[in-house]
């Protein structure tokens, strides 16, 4: 399913290009980072797959140019060695050649710019969303406000922080093993939170992203983008997740001491389950406090 | 060769070359372009090791997941200081040092046009960097907001803010004065016959770079002065709460910062354009195209700044404009790469150490250029931005690009400076050890960034452990290898028995090779007689 947009030949070529063989194809299927991962995840939205395809197109074009240029260079380095008796020629101009290698890159760049422009236009279209979530970065946590769901204010908001287990292990000289930190099967060290952002799949979600103190950046690689969270300004962006799952990310803009320790976890669930979750949180008046206190019991 | 330069009679000249006597007199008060060039180069090498030792701390902490060595605050201090010191302390002064040494010799001048200004622009630097480094010993430590000093984070710093900003002001003054001097020298001091379009490409690259410096260093000074007044004088240029805009700082900073990137690479292009024809024994292919490509890159560098900030939420039109502009840069840059490769085609190649560094530059800088093209694609950049992919990109451009070109230049001209040949064997060991380790250091960082590792973090998920360990091993190896570089230089200057000839390299063209080795204290006291084929890398066809 994940490979649906990518033909077998392209995958094989990608493997060749990266000298990575099957590793590329398999790692790309994982949503969250895995050891020895070589490439960008294809992600879980249509947009993220198109971002991945654009990235691969850029890679192919660059690899193609690189192979040709470096091959010519290596041939020159072997064929025209003085030690092999090469005698230097004296020419230093060739107008036709210079015109050709100016025009070919222009064509290749247009080939890249065209899909990039179309994708950028689509990524910019934040209209007609069913769910609006406001994301606020502050040192060193994220706050999520569910602003609007199907034209109504759900009135749900909470703060999401690094999970307590990672937090214990990451202290300088803790002597604890980061490999031992798990969330289910996944080694979740520094990529887990107490309260994940719960969202429905198959629904267009609009994010309003801002910050309270310094600049942060909200980044979940599997959604295909990051967006800076800037104090005093509100940026927007959107996603529509296709597959339920836990998608992990991190703050991407240096924001001070604990910049490495403000992860993001998006929990994508079927719409019915999301609505149930939303109702539970809405009904409990002290929802925020309760949710905020809950993970302490798990530690 | 004495016939070419009747003015230079080395044996007679060397004995009364007006060198000042006494150590302080010679070095502190010097107005001689070679002495000042030497000071710049030694200063740059010192900063390279200080900035490098900070990088070693970074790689040691990142060797494995978990926090083992330093607190996050100190880690941030290391990344910030590493950037500031390597950019302003190592790369830029190295190029200015090379310019000081070589420009007068390459254009047939006796010295730089403004020798006292020259002394001043160097001697500002040690004090500026002493002040910058001293912030690390102040309460609250040194700058921790990155070398870009983005507000509001940078303003959260303690007393380091004022000191760091003032030291960057001083570096800027030094750069501007150096640039004025270089422009004045190139435009006024060329010997008869050294026409602008026959100058060596290194001279061209510096002429263009100097204009970039004069254009953008004041912009940086403005941006950081606004930071200063925001912190200490109650202004709100970048405080949203007071009606300011933190993103405006980024626009102003990168209006300086992108030309700055080319300030650090254009002279490297110039160096490679000297070395490749020499060891190919063939004129530089497309001399004029090379010069126009330099000018073109310099012009484009002013209209692409916002590609460093695609994720700040610019309007669609803005992102598209900066994407197209950035992609355009690939065309003149490609012309340069193709021309170097074509210069080698049909030549008679030998691979002495300078040529090895130049060839590695062409390949590895291209790899940095390729990731640069990918980074220009805005939707893909939304993924790459602020990750280790970007770290890999700019280190390919700045280490295997700028720093490799500087090392190649040192090997290329060291015999001319010292009068002795360096050890080719140890030069080659230095090269191969550097070339292998630097790829082990930076290539895996592409994978880390693509897999989702942000930059500027002291600790990471275990999925990133393997490539980080490889990268760290490459880092320690690369760092240790640079001690060989120092050894080769010291050996060449003080212990080498092998005397260098005037021309040094069989295929060398240009006026500097008509002077004796070591070059006399005053270069061309009388204008040299310029013959066809001596300039423009032997290209006599235009
Ligand atoms: Cu943050």
Image (cartoon, coloured by chain):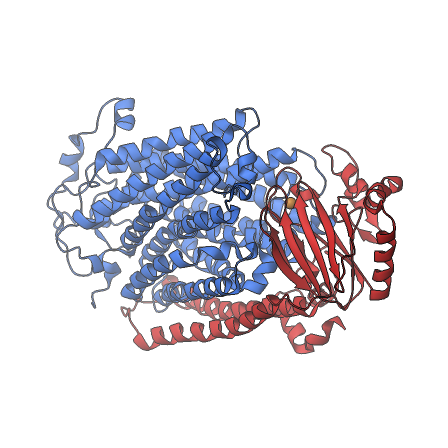
Chain colours: A red, B blue
Residue B287 screen position, x and y as percent: 28, 64
Q: Is residue B446 placed above or below B131 in the rendered structure?
A: below
Q: Nearer the viewer, residue A196 or B502?
A: A196
Q: Quadrant of ligand 1?
A: top right
Q: Nearer the viewer, residue B399 or A29?
A: A29
Q: Nearer the viewer, residue A77 or B438?
A: B438
Q: Is residue B344 left or right of residue B254?
A: left
Q: Is residue A51 left or right of residue B182?
A: right
Residue at x 13%, y 51% (from the top left corner):
B4
Q: Is residue B480 visible?
A: no
Q: Is residue A123 placed above or below B510 in the rendered structure?
A: below
Q: Quadrant of residue B66?
A: top right
Q: Is residue A130 left or right of residue B444?
A: right
Q: Is residue B399 left or right of residue A179?
A: left
Residue A98 screen position, x and y as percent: 34, 73
- The quarter of the image holding the C terminus of chain B is bottom left
Residue A128 screen position, x and y as percent: 68, 69
Q: Is residue A2 placed above or below B16 in the rendered structure?
A: below
Report the residue that reaches farthest toward the front.
A152
Q: How many discs appear?
A: 0
Q: Is residue B333 visible?
A: yes
């Amino acid at each position: 399913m994940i490979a649906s947009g990518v033909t077998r030949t392209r995958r094989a070529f990608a493997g060749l290009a990266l000298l990575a063989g099957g590793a590329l194809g398999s790692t790309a299927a994982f949503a969250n980072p895995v050891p020895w991962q070589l490439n960008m995840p294809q992600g879980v939205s249509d947009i993220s797959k198109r971002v991945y395809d654009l990235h691969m197109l850029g890679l192919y074009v660059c690899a193609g140019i690189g192979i040709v240029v470096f091959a010519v260079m290596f041939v020159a380095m072997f064929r025209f060695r003085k030690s092999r008796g090469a005698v230097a020629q004296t020419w230093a101009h060739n107008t036709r050649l210079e015109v050709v290698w100016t025009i070919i890159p222009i064509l290749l760049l247009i080939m890249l710019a065209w899909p990039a422009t179309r994708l950028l236009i689509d990524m910019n279209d934040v209209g007609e969303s069913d769910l609006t979530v406001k994301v606020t970065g502050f040192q060193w946590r994220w706050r999520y406000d569910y602003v609007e769901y199907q034209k109504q204010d759900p009135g749900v908001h909470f703060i999401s922080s690094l999970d307590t287990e990672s937090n214990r292990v990451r202290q300088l000289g803790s002597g604890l093993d980061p490999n031992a930190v798990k969330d289910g099967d996944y080694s979740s060290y520094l990529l887990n939170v107490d309260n994940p952002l719960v969202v429905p799949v198959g629904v267009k979600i609009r994010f309003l992203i801002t910050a309270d103190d310094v600049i942060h950046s909200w980044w979940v690689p599997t959604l295909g983008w990051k967006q800076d969270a800037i104090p005093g300004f509100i940026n927007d962006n959107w996603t529509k997740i296709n597959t339920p799952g836990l998608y992990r990310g991190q703050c991407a803009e240096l924001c001070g001491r604990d910049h490495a320790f403000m992860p993001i976890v998006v929990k994508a669930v079927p719409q019915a389950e999301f609505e149930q979750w939303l109702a539970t949180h809405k009904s409990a008046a002290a929802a925020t406090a309760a949710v905020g206190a809950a993970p302490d019991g798990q530690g | 060769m004495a016939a070419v330069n009747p003015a230079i009679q080395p044996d007679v000249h060397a004995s009364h070359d007006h060198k000042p006597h006494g150590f302080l007199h010679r070095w502190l008060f010097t107005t001689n372009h070679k002495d000042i060039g030497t000071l710049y180069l030694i200063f740059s090498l010192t900063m390279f090791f200080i900035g490098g030792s900070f990088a070693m701390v970074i790689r040691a902490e990142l060797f494995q997941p978990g926090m083992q060595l330093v607190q996050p605050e100190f880690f941030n201090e290391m990344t910030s200081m590493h950037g500031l010191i390597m950019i302003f302390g190592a790369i830029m002064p190295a190029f200015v040092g090379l310019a000081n040494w070589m420009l007068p010799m390459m254009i047939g001048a006796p010295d730089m046009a403004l020798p006292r200004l020259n002394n001043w622009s160097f001697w500002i630097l040690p004090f500026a960097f002493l002040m910058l480094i001293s912030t690390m010993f102040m309460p609250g430590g040194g700058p921790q907001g990155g070398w870009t000093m983005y507000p509001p984070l940078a303003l959260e710093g303690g007393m380091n803010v004022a000191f760091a900003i003032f030291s960057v002001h001083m570096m800027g003054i030094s750069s501007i004065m150096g640039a004025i001097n270089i422009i004045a020298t190139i435009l006024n001091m060329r010997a008869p016959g050294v026409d602008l379009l026959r100058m060596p490409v290194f001279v061209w690259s510096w002429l263009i770079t100097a204009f970039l410096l004069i254009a953008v260093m004041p912009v940086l000074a403005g941006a950081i002065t606004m930071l200063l007044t925001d912190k200490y004088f109650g202004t709100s240029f970048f405080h949203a709460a007071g009606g300011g805009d933190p993103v405006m700082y980024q626009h102003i900073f990168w209006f300086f910062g992108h030309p700055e990137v080319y300030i650090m690479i254009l002279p490297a292009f110039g160096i490679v354009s000297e070395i490749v024809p020499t060891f190919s024994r063939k004129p530089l292919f497309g001399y004029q195209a090379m010069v126009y490509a330099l000018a073109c890159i310099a012009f484009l560098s002013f209209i692409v700044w916002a590609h460093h900030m695609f994720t700040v939420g610019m309007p669609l039109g803005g992102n598209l404009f900066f994407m197209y502009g950035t992609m355009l840069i690939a065309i003149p840059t490609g012309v340069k790469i193709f021309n170097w490769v074509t210069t080698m085609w049909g030549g008679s190649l030998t691979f002495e150490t300078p040529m090895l560094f130049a060839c590695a530059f062409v390949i590895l800088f291209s790899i940095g250029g390729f990731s640069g093209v990918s980074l220009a694609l805005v939707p893909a950049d939304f993924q790459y931005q602020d990750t280790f992919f970007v770290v890999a990109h700019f280190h390919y451009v700045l280490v295997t690009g700028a720093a490799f070109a500087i090392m190649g230049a040192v090997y290329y001209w060291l015999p001319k400076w010292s009068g002795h040949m360096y050890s080719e064997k140890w030069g080659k060991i230095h090269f191969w050890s550097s070339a292998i380790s630097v790829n082990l250091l930076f290539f895996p960082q592409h994978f880390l960034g693509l897999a989702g590792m942000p930059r500027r973090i002291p600790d990471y998920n275990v999925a990133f452990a393997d490539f980080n360990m490889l990268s760290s091993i490459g880092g320690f190896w690369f760092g240790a290898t640079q001690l060989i570089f120092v050894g080769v230089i010291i050996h060449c200057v003080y212990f080498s028995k092998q005397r260098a000839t005037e021309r040094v390299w069989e295929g060398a063209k240009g006026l500097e090779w008509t002077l004796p080795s070591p070059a006399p204290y005053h270069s061309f006291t009388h204008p040299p007689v310029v013959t066809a084929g001596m300039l423009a890398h032997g290209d006599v066809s235009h």
